[in-house]
Image (spheres, grey):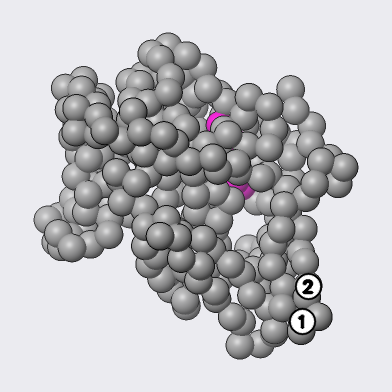
Amino acid sequence: MNLTFAHISNTRARIVFVTVAAFVTVAAFGRFLEVHDMKSLVRSSTLVFVGRVKSVAPSGITTQLSYPTWEKVVFEWLRADVEVVEPIKGTRKGKLVQVAMLSTIEADDSSGMINQPGMLEPKQGDLFLFCVAPTSATNLFAAFTAPYDDDQAIFPLNRNYWRYSSHRDGTEKRDSPFFERHTLIWSLVDDSGQIIPAGAEQMRTAYASEITAARSNRVIYLQWRTETNHAGWMRDVPKMPAETNQNTK
């Protein structure tokens, strides 16, 4: 069952909706994150694969999001060309997949942004586990949990990544909502950052039912506008095609 949660600002009457297929967790200061267990994420995503970033460039597609502390921030989608190293679902080895990944354009006081989106900083050569869905742009994919939580569906395959510290030092509890994904990441890449081929095969076996199940029909919209109702509540809604200024290659 899908559940809808809301975060309400204490300083201004506005609301941000997050629809979650599995469960949510709360970041510092109370922003809800969209967090899925791995079975749900693999089942719902259109493409799932281990990929290596070949190049990263600005896409020219920008947007703003209405979360209270992001008002002065302009976000730009990066366009990463990613080579499929180990296919899990919906693609094949060696294929090049274009993935949109959220970043910021410094504007006004964006450096002081609180509860920022779960953005990643892809660089050439980086390895990630991608769980992605199609976007509103042709032949461009994005994290299943975008635009707010890229890092809840695209995972760096680097055991030294700072978010993995508790799993790395053995203190992460098994009931953590992140334990399953961290264990999976450890099976896919070794301490030196090299892919473990047997790990990908084990993943394909472990998630066989999810790989063949019907995927979600989710589309990730890249441009958003703020909608305000008669009571003053504000939320993000996708821009319609006539409103967008997408520059796609």
Examine the image and state in which quarter residue 200 appears: top left
Figure check: 235 above or below 91: below
Could you tell me if residue 165 is visible in this image? no
- Judged left or right of residue 55, residue 130 is left
Query: What residue is disc 2 on?
Result: 228
Question: Where does the N terminus fall, quadrant-wise?
Answer: bottom left
- On screen, residue 12 above or below 201: below
Residue 116, quarter of picture:
bottom right
Residue 18's disc number: none
Q: Hey, what amino acid is under mark 2?
A: Thr
Where residue 188 appears, as percent x and y from the top left, is: 23, 31
The front one of 233 and 52 is 233
Residue 82 in view, yes or no: yes
Instruction: Give left or right: position of 113 versus 13.
Output: left
The stretch of residues the image draws in magenta is 99-103
Disc 1 and disc 2 in contact, CB within 8 angstroms: yes
Judged from the image, the secondary structure of the residue bearing numbered disc 2 is strand
Kind of residue sitting beneath label 1: Gly
The residue at the point 80 percent across, 46 percent down is: 240
In the rendering, at what x and y percent does residue 88 appear? 33, 25
Task: Please give the name of the residue rendered at 19% of the width and 33% of the height, measured from the top-left corner.
Answer: 206
User: Which residue is located at x 76 percent, y 64 percent?
Assistant: 226
Return the mark for residue 232.
1
Q: Position of residue 128 (x, y in %)?
A: 39, 34
Q: Can residue 182 be found in the magenta stretch?
A: no
Q: Please report the residue visible at 45 percent of the width from the left and 60 percent of the height from the top.
A: 2
The crowding category of the residue bearing disc 2, from other C-alpha atoms within 10 Å (few below 14, some 14 to 19, many at least 20), is some
Q: Secondary structure at mark 1?
A: loop
Magenta residues: mostly which secondary structure? strand
In the image as oriented, which residue stretches furthest toward the left?
170
